[in-house]
Image (cartoon, rainbow, N blue to C red):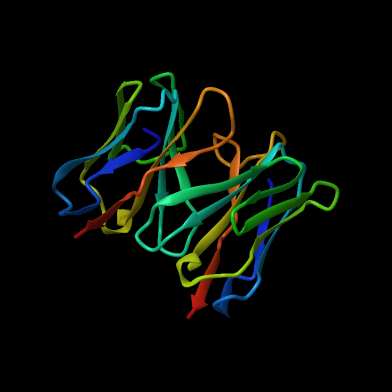
Amino acid sequence: KNEVEQSPQNLTAQEGEFITINCSYSVGISALHWLQQHPGGGIVSLFMLSSGKKKHGRLIATINIQEKHSSLHITASHPRDSAVYICAVRSPYSGGGADGLTFGKGTHLIIQP
Amino acid sequence: DTEVTQTPKHLVMGMTNKKSLKCEQHMGHRAMYWYKQKAKKPPELMFVYSYEKLSINESVPSRFSPECPNSSLLNLHLHALQPEDSALYLCASRPPTGEKLFFGSGTQLSVL
């Protein structure tokens, strides 16, 4: 079974700070997702990565396949970025539910004004 | 339309009630999912529908009954639930090609 570890579990920062959230997984994957969940529930898919780096606005996601590690960066953080950020991996090699997704436990981010 | 719409947003029900959750998408996605999420936990997969057929049931109790009447609509029928079933129920869909999941905003369910 693919184990997905996220760090930190909780992060509080000041507006404008550069934020990094990390995700490590234990076995090879076909794709890694970064998801954002606001209080109240809805989940938004931010990125899907299989290699390299992607950028969308102030968000940057990178993945190192050899090291089995991905990072999500937020530049010029803003209070509206406060949310839970979830890493999920799709692996053809092990469990992760019927659709092959194994979720991390999430990182609870609070950006203070 | 790039949304997955779930109704109701909130639901309170007694243990003897029968209720249904609804999920709708008009993006032409042919895979639809029900997830259950307890507070401060990641989502747990309950059911997967692929081309309107139930392809996976992750050993969910029979008091949860999914239905997929057509390619745009997914229901979750609830009957004789227990207080421990209180959770956020999320619907998601995925296009025929591609990895990205589209989630609804969820139904927050409380069972009294």
Who's the residue at 37% across and 38% down the image? B3
The quadrant where residue A31 appears: top right
Quadrant in the picture for the N terminus of chain B: top left
* Res. B99 image quadrant: top right
Q: Is residue B3 above or below residue A69?
A: above
Residue B4 pos. (x, y %): 36, 38
Residue at 31 percent across and 37 percent down: it is B62
State the residue at coordinates (22%, 46%).
B8
Residue B18 in the image: state x and y as whole percent.
15, 42
Location of residue A95 in the rendering, given as x and y in whole percent from the top left corner: 63, 40
The image shows residue A77 at horizontal and vertical percentages of 57, 70
Position above or below: A48 against A87: above
Residue situated in front as seen by the camera: B84 or A79: A79
Name the one closer to the observer, B6 or A13.
A13
Q: Is residue A28 above or below residue A16?
A: above
Near-viewer residue (B42 or A69)? A69
Quadrant where the image shows the C terminus of chain B: bottom left
The answer to whether residue B39 is left or right of residue A29 is left
**Residue sitting nearer the eye, B66 or A11:** A11
